């Protein structure tokens, strides 16, 4: 079952020991190549970048940060993806982390994630059709999906 990913933030101190930085990033790269085989992204040894579909939104960058992945979502915000289930093997934990990132990317690229704000003044995202939960989101101004700006009625 697909987990709801909107406003997913992690606390590194609760991560499962044994999940290596290399293992998580390699798992992500394998799954990205399976899901997006047409060269939709560029990678370096420690990051993956999807170029912006719209300049108002910006690019998506996924960076390894120890045993977690940080997904920078355009000009708006970022999300941490980590493992909190200590019963999982290191391999399964790495797989789950990468699958959760892929699920978020699929929602983003299908314009199901709404972005608001900016890195300068705070921002966030929520699943289209849901109401943003943050107090800060009430005065969020212009909203965007991956393909560009949307109306406030979006």
Image (cartoon, grey):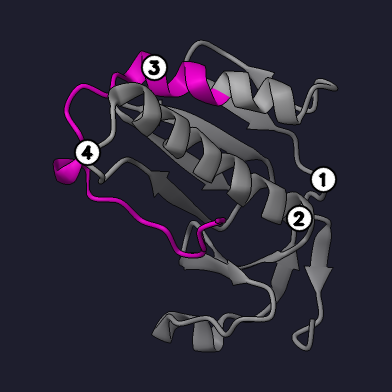
Residue name at image x 77 percent, y 29 percent: 36
| Magenta residues, dominant SS class | loop
Q: Secondary structure at mark 1?
A: loop
Q: What is the x, y in percent for residue 97?
A: 43, 37
> Of label 2 and label 1, which has the lower sequence position?
1
Furthest residue to the top? Answer: 45
Q: Which residue is mark 2?
A: 146
The part of the chain drawn in magenta is 1-28
The CA distance from mark 4 to mark 2 is 35 Å
> Of label 3 and label 1, which has the lower sequence position?
3
Disc 4 residue crowd, few under 14, some 14–19, many 20+, Cα 10 Å: few
Q: Is residue 94 above or below residue 22?
A: below
The CA distance from mark 4 to mark 3 is 17 Å
Residue 87: mark: 4
The CA distance from mark 1 to mark 4 is 39 Å
Task: Answer whether residue 41 is visible to the viewer in this image.
Answer: yes
The CA distance from mark 2 to mark 3 is 29 Å
Residue 53: mark: 1
């Amino acid at each position: 079952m697909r987990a709801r990913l909107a406003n997913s933030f992690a606390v590194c101190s609760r991560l499962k020991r044994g999940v290596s930085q290399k293992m998580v990033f390699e798992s992500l790269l394998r799954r990205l190549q399976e899901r997006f085989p047409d060269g939709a992204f560029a990678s370096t040894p420690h990051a993956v970048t999807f170029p912006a579909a719209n300049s108002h939104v910006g690019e998506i960058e996924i960076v390894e940060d120890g045993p977690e992945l940080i997904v920078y979502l355009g000009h708006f915000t970022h999300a941490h993806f980590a493992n909190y289930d200590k019963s999982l093997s290191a391999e399964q934990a790495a797989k789950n982390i990468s699958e959760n990132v892929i699920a978020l990317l699929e929602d983003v690229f299908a314009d199901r994630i709404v972005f608001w704000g900016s890195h300068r003044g705070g921002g966030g995202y929520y699943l289209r059709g849901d109401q943003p939960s943050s107090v800060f989101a009430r005065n969020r101004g212009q909203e965007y999906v991956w393909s560009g700006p949307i109306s406030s009625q979006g």
